[in-house]
């Protein structure tokens, strides 16, 4: 029983509490943990975004794509959805094998971000390990993701 009645469109914006309510009910019905469901949804979203917005995916590697999320993709999203409240990603590149992404949001969706990141890595062929470090409590609004390219993995850019 959510205010939108569960009717969602691509042009609408919705209170994140609705997603939390729906995922909570799905967790009760399936027994699956909420973080796992939100993570899986992040992976699903990545696949939908890659079909719906192919222009964002015309880059050679997962590192190239992920490094552009905040300064390019989120800028474009705001053009379509001026009221969107998007998370921030601060990126560091200490070397050409490492990308450090620090996620911050007032919403508890670090699991969603993790699903998006891991799906991006799969999209470009894998070969990247992800270390997740909680920067807050309860651990879903500020997280550092350290991505390390394995030797002989995706091309350095």
Image (cartoon, rainbow, N blue to C red):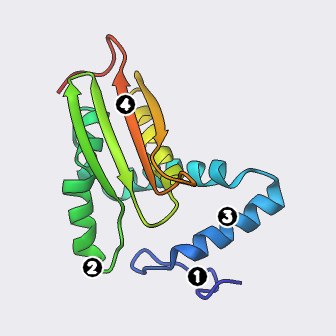
Element marked by disc 2: loop
Point 67% across, 72% down: residue: 21
- Quadrant location, the N terminus: bottom right
Point 38% across, 33% down: residue: 146
Circle 1/circle 4 CB separation < 8 Å: no
Image coords of residue 118 (percent x, y):
46, 38
Q: CA distance from mark 4 to mark 3?
A: 28 Å
Point 51% across, 79% down: residue: 15
Chain-order first, disc 2 or disc 4: 2
- Quadrant location, the C terminus: top left
Residue 13, by quadrant, is bottom left
Chain-order first, disc 4 or disc 3: 3
Give the vertical position of 96 relative to 36 (above or below): above
Point 65% across, 83% down: residue: 2
Chain-order first, disc 1 or disc 3: 1
Element marked by disc 4: strand
Instruction: Choose between 149 and 107: the one closer to the eye.
Output: 107
Label 2: which residue? Answer: 82
Element marked by disc 1: loop
Label 3: which residue? Answer: 23
147 horizontally vs 77: left or right: right
Q: CA distance from mark 1 to mark 4?
A: 36 Å
Label 4: which residue? Answer: 147
Circle 4/circle 3 CB separation < 8 Å: no
Image coords of residue 61 (percent x, y):
27, 32
Q: Which of label 1 and label 3 is nearer to you?
A: 3
Q: Which of label 4 and label 3 is nearer to you?
A: 4
* Disc number for residue 7: 1
Q: CA distance from mark 1 to mark 2?
A: 21 Å
Element marked by disc 3: helix
Instruction: Choose between 136 and 9: the one closer to the eye.
Output: 136
């Amino acid at each position: 029983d959510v205010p939108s009645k569960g009717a969602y469109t691509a042009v609408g914006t919705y209170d994140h509490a609705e997603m939390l309510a729906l995922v909570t009910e799905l967790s009760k019905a399936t027994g699956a943990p909420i973080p796992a469901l939100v993570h899986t949804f992040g992976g699903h979203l990545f696949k939908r975004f890659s079909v719906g917005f192919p222009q964002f995916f015309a880059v050679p590697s997962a590192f190239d794509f992920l490094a552009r999320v905040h300064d390019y993709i989120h800028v474009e999203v705001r053009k379509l959805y001026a009221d969107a409240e998007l998370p921030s990603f601060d990126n560091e590149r200490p070397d050409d094998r490492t990308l450090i992404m620090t996620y911050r949001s007032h919403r508890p969706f670090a699991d969603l971000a993790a699903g998006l990141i891991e799906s991006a890595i799969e999209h470009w062929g894998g070969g990247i390990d992800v270390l997740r470090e909680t920067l807050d409590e309860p651990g879903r609004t500020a997280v550092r993701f350290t991505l390390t390219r394995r030797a002989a993995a995706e091309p350095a850019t």
